[in-house]
Image: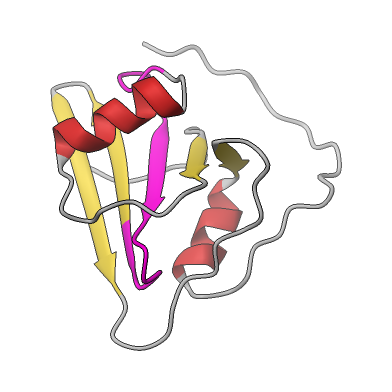
């Protein structure tokens, strides 16, 4: 069974990516340009240069899963990012997938239980 949950962390890459890239190419971006561990279980989000395609790369216990969405009309709005990536919440990812503009200016403090990764 596969799916995304609020327990995961979500990182949006700040630059447009060639959508022909697969598991290995996107994993290289995560490790080399984002400086993150691709096998952590976190979700890495990539947008194409036309901003009408999105890929999500995530490691699950037995291998990588790649989600791919192509819009039939319109584009995704890439948030302004000062670094190579921006951290999103599950809710912000949902908004982005629905085509709403996500701009993180300030996050109010919320309770969050720390889960151990198995």
Image location of residue 84, percent across then percent down = 54, 36
Residue 40 in picture, x, y percent from top left: 37, 19
Q: What secondary structure characterizes most of the magenta part?
A: loop
Q: In this view, does 34 lie to the left or right of 63?
A: right
User: Does residue 40 show up magenta in the picture?
Assistant: yes
Q: What stretch is highlighted in magenta?
A: 37-54
Number of marks in the rendered image: 0
Where the N terminus falls, by quadrant? top left
Q: Closer to the camera, 82 or 7?
A: 82
Colour scheme of the picture: secondary structure
Q: Can residue 1 be seen in this view?
A: no
User: Percent x, y for residue 18?
Assistant: 26, 53
With respect to residue 64, does 5 lie above or below?
A: below
Could you say which is closer to the camera, residue 28 or residue 72? 28
Q: In this view, does 89 lie above or below 7?
A: below
Q: Residue sitting at 54 percent across and 48 percent down?
A: 90
What x and y, as percent, mark residue 109? 85, 37
Residue 96 against residue 109 in the figure, above or below = below
Residue 110, by quadrant, is: top right
């Amino acid at each position: 069974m596969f799916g995304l949950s609020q327990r995961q962390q979500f990182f949006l890459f700040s630059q447009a990516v060639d959508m022909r890239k697969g598991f290995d190419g996107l994993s290289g971006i995560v490790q080399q340009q984002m400086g993150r561990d691709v096998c952590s279980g976190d979700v890495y989000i990539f947008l194409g240069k036309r901003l009408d395609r999105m890929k999500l790369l995530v490691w699950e216990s037995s291998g990588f899963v790649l989600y791919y969405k192509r819009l039939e009309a319109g584009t995704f709005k890439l948030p302004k990012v000062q670094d190579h990536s921006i951290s999103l919440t599950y809710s912000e990812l949902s908004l982005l997938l629905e085509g709403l503009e996500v701009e993180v200016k300030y996050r109010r403090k919320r309770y969050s239980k720390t889960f151990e990764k198995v």
